[in-house]
Structures are given as C-alpha cells and as structure tokens.
Image (tube, rainbow, N blue to C red):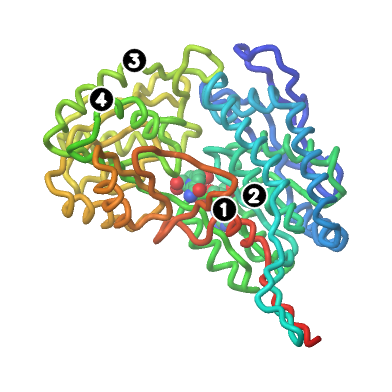
Amino acid sequence: MNIAQSPSSPETALPAQLRLSIAGKLVDAERSFDVLNPATNAVIAQAPEGSAEQLEEAITAAAEAFKSWSTLDWQTRSDYVQRYADALEARKEDLISLLTLEQGKPRHSQATSEVEAALYWVREVAKRHLPVEVIEETDEHVVEVHHTPLGVVGAITPWNFPMLLGLWKVAPCLITGNTMVLKPSPYTPLTSLFFGEIAQQVLPAGVLNVVSGGNELGQIITEHPAIAKISFTGSTATGKRVMASGASNLKRITLELGGNDAAVVLADADWPSLVKPLFWAAFGNSGQWCIAVKRLYVHSSIHAEFTAAFVEYAKSIKVGDGMDPTSDLGPIQNRMQYRKLLDLFADTRDKGYKIALGGTIDESLAGNFVPVTVIDNPPEDSRIVQEEPFGPILPIIAFDDTEEVIAKVNASPYGLAGSVWGGDRDKAIEVAKRMETGTVWVNEIHIHGIDIPFGGHKLSGMGVENGQEGLAGFTNTKTYMFRK
Ligand code: NAD
C-alpha cells in the first residue's frame, strides 16, 4: 500500500507502505482498497484487503502464540507492553499525521490528543493486573479466585477514534495474557496497520495481528470457533449481529455501541461558564463521538440566553482541513456518514424547525465538510432529538420541570452516558442518579481513566472497558479450592 503525502502535511516520515501484520510478519494482500482523505476525498493510500485465508492464518498464529504468551509471568508481559508503548512513542508524530490524513480530525489538537491518550493508555495499562482474591483461608481450607486468559480475542473497531479505541483493546487484552486479531474499520485502516507494524518490532510473533479489509472479515471473526472473545466498538445494529453470530461457541462479548447522550442544565447552573465546555462536549471530533452530547436540555428560564451565547461562541469555530492549523473542526470521516447527515439536515429544514446556526451543507466542496449547526428547541419526537446524528448538529431543548426532563432523557433506547449541570450539587446528583446510563458526570464531562470502567446500558452496549472490570472482561473467573 502506498501513502501519498498530503500537500499540506508537515514534515513527517509517513511509512511509504503499510502491510498486514500476521504471525510476526508484514505481508501484502492480493487485493487492495482505496483510503480517502475526508478533507479532499482524494485517495491517500491503497490499503491491503486481507483475504479470508490470511485472516485464518492470523487466527492460527494468534492461537499458537497464546500457548507461550499466556504462560509468561505478569512482569514479563508488562515489560513487553511497556516496550510497545516506547516503540509507539518513537513514531508518535507520524501516527498523528496519519490519523489526521485518514480520519480528518485537526492535527494540532484532536489528533494529537487522541494519539497521546492512546499511548498513555498502553503505558499505564501495562502496570495493571488482577490480583488473586483470597475468599477463605483457614487451617483446613483455602478458596482463591484467579483470572485466567481467554485465548484469542477478535477486536473490531470503528472509524471515529481508530487509534484510541484500537489500543484500548490491545493493551488490556495483552496484559491479561491473551493474543489478538484486530480488524479496523475499512474507512480508517492506516493507523491500525501502522500500530500493528510497530508491534511486530517488539512483541513475540502472533501476539498482535492486524488484518484490514471489508465488513465480511468482521463477520468471519465473530463466527470463528478459535476466537474466544469479541471486543467490539461500533454501531448498535452491527453489535446485535456480532452478538448473534458469537453465540455459536458462546464467545465472551464486549459491546461498546451507539448513544444519544443528554446533558441537562438546571435552572441554578452558572450557565455562562458552561457554553464553551458544552460546545466542545457536543462538537468535538465534529460530533462523531459515541459520548458526544447529542441532546442539550436547558431549563426554560435560561434557555434563550444560553442558546444565544452558545451560538455566538459556535460562530467563532472554523471547520476545515485537519492539516490546516487554523481549523478547529475537521470534516465528516466518510461519504456514507456525510450522506446520512445530508438527509437529517434536510429533514430538519423541511419540518421547519428553528435553525439557530448553520443548517445547510455546501455540497460543492470537495471534502466532507458540514457546518456547525444548532437547532433551537425542536419537538421531542423530532429525528434530530431521537436519533444519533454522529455529526456537528445539536438540538438545544427547553424544559420546565426536572421530572419531565428525567423522563425524556430515559425514554431513549440508548444508555451510554449523560451529564447534569447545576449550582446545587446535591440536587444535580439526585438527577444524575436517576439517569439510565453507564456513565454520568455532574458539573464535568468526558473524564476517562485507566481505572474508570466505561460501558453502556440498554442498546448502548454490554460489559465495560477500562478499570478492573474491563481487565476482568478479558479473563475467565477461575475458582481454586485446596483442602490442606
Ligand atoms: P459499524 O458498526 O458500521 O462498524 C464498526 C466495525 O464493525 C467496523 O470495523 C466494521 O467493518 C465492522 N463490521 C461491520 N459489519 C460487521 C459484521 N456483520 N460483523 C462484524 N463486524 C462488522 O460502526 P461505525 O460506523 O464504524 O462506528 C460508528 C458507531 O460506533 C456509532 O454508532 C458510535 O456511537 C459507535 N461508537 C461507540 C463507541 C463506544 O465506546 N460506545 C465508541 C465509538 C463509536
């Protein structure tokens, strides 16, 4: 696969070729597919389209590598994963450039943060382990709970945060003694192929295999009898299919799926201080974020003033090519998602909702650029409130009564995350406690941590990533009992 240097890219040493990582080797595929720069829709690379046979080789290699990797002591595995973090760090600038080229997010801000967060995750997860839990210890009897690795994990990732969400899976999988076959989204395969190549310099052969290609590879992974667990991040629709096909051999399954997160601003909130953080919570990564604020409920006593100030701030935001350091937001990552947004924007206009900012996509532009759009108080049953737009469009909805807003927040079939903002912390916490979501923040948002479990309720997922629970998700619970 060849990567064309973007004319606007800074001085970098992007790899001229990226290959599949299988059994410790870098291999080409017979076929390839185009990878586009979403800022121009120009082809930036031909990515290898792994065949079913190559995927089979990768799974076999991972199963073979599991035999020795799983028996290494924890410290040795930790040293390997730390060395992987060092090797990634050495190519950090190239990873950032590649991420902007294939995903679109601004290089100087969001691409840098994503790569830095991903590297931090690898380094820190390498220090975590699941201790043996002693349940009972008497003169006669001992009961212990151990966590044993599962085997080969199949990782399937989306296109919005390919670096971070990929390495969120790799690091805990490896430290707990499993091996992996990772299949990135066909829209953003390059950074994953690159971190796969880097892994081959430091990890034993077959421990981490990366195979890019179409959705059908994902289907094969979910059905394959030698795969013990699927760690999937993507849409709810695909998540349901993953769960159905994983049933064949009762795979362990972690699903991180879609969301329609609400932020609730109570009447006593210090609302002027919230304009900027809530803007970025909604529009970061151009809204292509599972935990983006997608419904912003503001108390009716402050709704008009808040919306006016929000729109004022939003007007200062520049949407453009992520390689341009003056761009605050990049394009939509792919044409499929861009077309979904064209449809949603048309619905919003056709229904006559009040458009406070933006509202029309300029289709004459070469890139997938979508303007920052704010919809002022659309009805609760509108598509823009009920659906996950996954783009830079936000409804700001007025509410009068706390019970009413809690009911609206919880009426969603999704339950990923939510936030509550208020002057009276205890009252805000009371609202937060009643949100049916996997994560809820009070007077802050989007705090994540190595030791903080993250996962969705309802149609937003199953299981968690991160924290001890996330690590445990890569293991079997094994109870040992000894009669002394
Ligand atoms: P998607 O479901 O279309 O694709 C995700 C991955 O699944 C891709 O790698 C794809 O090739 C693969 N895939 C497609 N069909 C498959 C099949 N039948 N079997 C196995 N794998 C298959 O999702 P997307 O469009 O790439 O990502 C956007 C979605 O991801 C949004 O809904 C977003 O909210 C969600 N998301 C969730 C989280 C989270 O942590 N909860 C994080 C990021 C994104």
**Can you say whether 286 is above or below 49 in the image?**
above
Please say if the residues under marks 4 and 3 sit with CB atoms less than 8 Å apart: no
* Neighbours of disc 4 within 10 Å: few (<14), some (14-19), many (20+): few
Three-letter code for the amino acid on which mark 2 is drawn: Lys
Please say if the residues under marks 1 and 2 sit with CB atoms less than 8 Å apart: yes
Spatial CA span between label 4 and label 1: 34 Å
* Neighbours of disc 2 within 10 Å: few (<14), some (14-19), many (20+): many
**Hey, which residue is sitting farthest front in the picture?**
139
- Of the residues tagged 4 and 1, which is closer to the observer? 4
Q: Quadrant of the N terminus?
A: top right
In the picture of the structure, the residue carrying the numbered disc 3 is 316
Q: Earlier in the sequence, mark 3 or mark 1?
A: 3
Query: Which element type, helix, strand or loop, lies under badge 2?
Result: helix
The residue drawn where x is 51% and y is 22% is: 39
Please say if the residues under marks 4 and 2 sit with CB atoms less than 8 Å apart: no
- Quarter of the image for residue 433 reads bottom left
In the picture of the structure, the residue carrying the numbered disc 2 is 169
Three-letter code for the amino acid on which mark 1 is drawn: Glu
The residue drawn where x is 42% and y is 24% is: 369
Spatial CA span between label 4 and label 2: 38 Å
Q: Earlier in the sequence, mark 3 or mark 2?
A: 2
Query: Which element type, helix, strand or loop, lies under badge 4?
Result: helix
- Of the residues tagged 4 and 3, which is closer to the observer? 4
- Quarter of the image for residue 90 reads top right
The residue drawn where x is 24% and y is 30% is: 270
Three-letter code for the amino acid on which mark 4 is drawn: Pro
Q: Where residue 272 is drawn, which disc sits there?
A: 4
Residue 340 visible, this orientation: no
Query: Which element type, helix, strand or loop, lies under badge 1?
Result: loop
Three-letter code for the amino acid on which mark 3 is drawn: Ser
Please say if the residues under marks 4 and 1 sit with CB atoms less than 8 Å apart: no
